[in-house]
Amino acid sequence: MKEKIICIVGPTASGKTSLSIELAKKINAEIISADSMQIYKGLDIGTAKVTEEEKQGVVHHIIDICNPNEKFSVADFKELCYHKIDEILSKGKKVIIVGGTGLYVSAVVEDMNFENEDIDVEYRNKLEKLAKEKSNGYLHEMLQKIDPKSAELIHKNNVKRVIRALEIAKNSKELKSTHMQKEMIRKKQESKYDFYVFCLNIERELLYKRINERVDIMVKNGVIDEAKKLYDMNLDKTSTCMQAIGYKEFFPYFEGKSTLDECIEKLKVETRKYSKRQMTWFKNKLSPYFLDVTDDKNILICEILNVLNN
């Protein structure tokens, strides 16, 4: 019988952390974080990284493993996550994967293959040049015409993924979105694990209220100082950290181009937009079981366990 692996996903500020910790205590589990920013040391407030107090003794993995100037790809995450799954299971414990980075979760659940990808260097260089000369939005519009499903899931500023989707559309008989769907079905049949994905479903007005409140708390707790430290590192603008929501919104303030209030409002707007993209990914790519966040945590835990036991 395949091992059952629980995945808890949902938009930012939906309550993934607290639910996963309560569930972990209930079933003797350890948690693997699937958050592309919480892997970085020193980026704590802006990423809403779980604190030691919040953990309540539950072991968390794949947090604080890289410095901001180090590269860590989705392929790296997939490999490390599988290693951690085996490590946790060998101790006789259950595994809960928790996070809001849809691609990270999909990479593991679908067992995505990142090896031997055909790269058209000339075409890639051409696309990178177009992005610099005409804008990221211009490149994203190209993708929207060719593969609208992928364009809906990929933000225009995620240039690397936009370019990769365009490369696949040019060099393959299938679009990226079609290819991923077929891979998901095939890998699900072959995987040695049974992944059960649960998505926290929250009414939009309530979610936006939580997001606005979270941003205000982050500002109060010192996210601006954290953002300034990152800004002062002078990292390449295309690096993952420099693109992270929660930090780059303050860069215009440091440059004297915007007021602090304008940057805070910008962060709230961008976080709300990001939450919509997260939900689009979870619904379209992961076919999850939906959980109503307005229910009591004990009710949600019972729902999860009922699904696993049926």
Image (tube, helix red, strand yellow):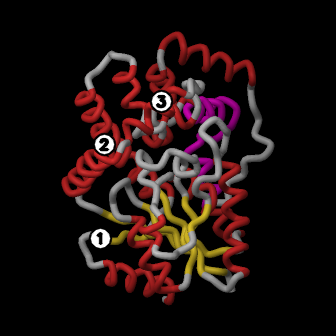
Q: Earlier in the sequence, mark 2 or mark 1?
A: 2
Write down the residue under mark 3. 157
Mark sitting on residue 102:
none
User: Residue 37, relative to residue 225: is it above or below?
Assistant: below
Circle 3: residue type:
Asn
Write down the residue under mark 2. 219
Crowd class of label 2 (few under 14; some 14 to 19; many from 20; radius 10 Å): some
Circle 2: residue type:
Val
Q: Earlier in the sequence, mark 2 or mark 3?
A: 3
**Picture quadrant where residue 195 is located:** bottom right
User: Residue 160, relative to residue 303: is it above or below?
Assistant: above
Q: Are marks 3 and 1 in contact (CB under 8 Å)?
A: no
Magenta stretch contains residue 171? yes
Residue 129 horizontal/vertical position (percent) = 60, 14
Of badges 2 and 1, the one in the foreground is 2
Calculate the distance from the C-alpha at mark 2 to the C-alpha at mark 1.
Answer: 29 Å
Tell me where the magenta segment starts and ends, as one range.
Answer: 160-184
Q: Is residue 235 left or right of residue 226?
A: right
Circle 1: residue type:
Asp
Residue 304 horizontal/vertical position (percent) = 43, 80
Q: Are marks 2 and 3 in contact (CB under 8 Å)?
A: no
Q: Earlier in the sequence, mark 3 or mark 1?
A: 3
Write down the residue under mark 1. 292
